[in-house]
């Protein structure tokens, strides 16, 4: 039954690239019923500067994204079934086209974005190419480190 078990995908520390738009996390639902419940991004910039734009998006055209294959972790119940969703973190090749669902500007100087119940609803149809992701866009001089996570239920 969907929605009964909580999972999370977390990145290792990533140093952002200046003047870039890159995905931090891309989740592929494995079964109907995936619901986004939480996301967070934090930065360790040592000086103030222009904000980093964070986008929550749905893939419109998948292309051939590439990154670090990451298995979502069980969050609240060690007896939960094996998660059916898969994930990429620190993408090196982006999806071809995305639809932005939400955007935030976050300070790179110790900035923190944490949203609960951000999209507490099913995420699109489970079809070839259906994905949900979290990405950043930086200004020319911004290169802080960051960590990010996305929580969901299945």
Image: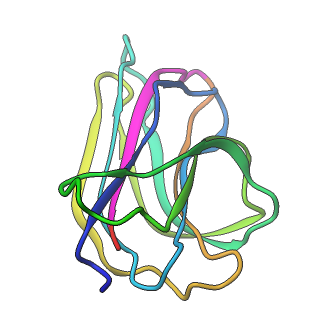
> Residue 111 in the image: x percent, y percent?
29, 31
Q: How many marks?
A: 0
**Which residue lies most toward the top here?**
46
Q: Position of residue 32 (x, y in %)?
A: 46, 85
Position of residue 11 in the picture relative to residue 46 (left or right): right
Start-end of magenta stretch:
141-152
Based on the displayed image, in which of its 4 quarters is residue 70 positioned?
A: top right
Q: Nearer the viewer, residue 127 or 100?
A: 127
Q: Nearer the viewer, residue 12 or 100?
A: 12
Where residue 94 appears, as percent x and y from the top left, is: 73, 52
Q: Is residue 131 magenta?
A: no
Say left or right for 148 vs 6. right
The relative height of residue 2 versus residue 91 in the rendered view (above or below) is below
Which residue is drawn at the image coordinates 46% and 22% (left, top)?
145
Quadrant in the picture for the N terminus: bottom left
Q: Residue at (50%, 65%) from the top-left corner?
A: 85
Q: Residue 50: x percent and y percent?
A: 45, 31
Q: Name the foreground residue: 93 vs 84.
A: 84
Picture colour scheme: rainbow
User: Which of these two is toward me, 3 or 52?
Assistant: 3
Quadrant of the drawing holding the C terminus: bottom left
Q: Residue at x 42, y 23 (%)?
A: 49
Left/right placement of residue 127 relative to residue 38 reads: right
Tell me what residue is drawn at x 40 percent, y 32 percent.
147
Q: Residue furthest front?
A: 79
Classified by dominant secondary structure, the portion drawn in magenta counts as strand
């Amino acid at each position: 039954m969907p929605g009964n078990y909580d999972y999370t995908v977390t990145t290792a520390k990533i140093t952002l690239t200046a003047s870039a738009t890159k995905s931090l996390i891309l989740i592929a639902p494995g079964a109907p019923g995936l619901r986004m419940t939480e996301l967070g991004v934090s930065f360790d910039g040592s000086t103030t500067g222009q904000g980093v734009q964070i986008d929550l998006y749905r893939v419109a055209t998948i292309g051939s994204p590439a990154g670090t294959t990451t298995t979502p972790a069980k969050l609240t119940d060690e007896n939960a079934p094996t998660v059916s969703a898969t994930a990429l973190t620190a993408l090196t090749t982006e999806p071809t086209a995305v639809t932005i669902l939400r955007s935030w500007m976050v300070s790179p100087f110790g900035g923190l974005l944490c949203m609960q119940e951000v999209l507490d609803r099913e995420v699109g149809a489970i079809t070839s190419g259906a994905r949900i992701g979290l990405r950043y866009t930086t200004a020319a001089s911004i290169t802080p480190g960051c960590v990010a996570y996305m929580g969901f239920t299945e």
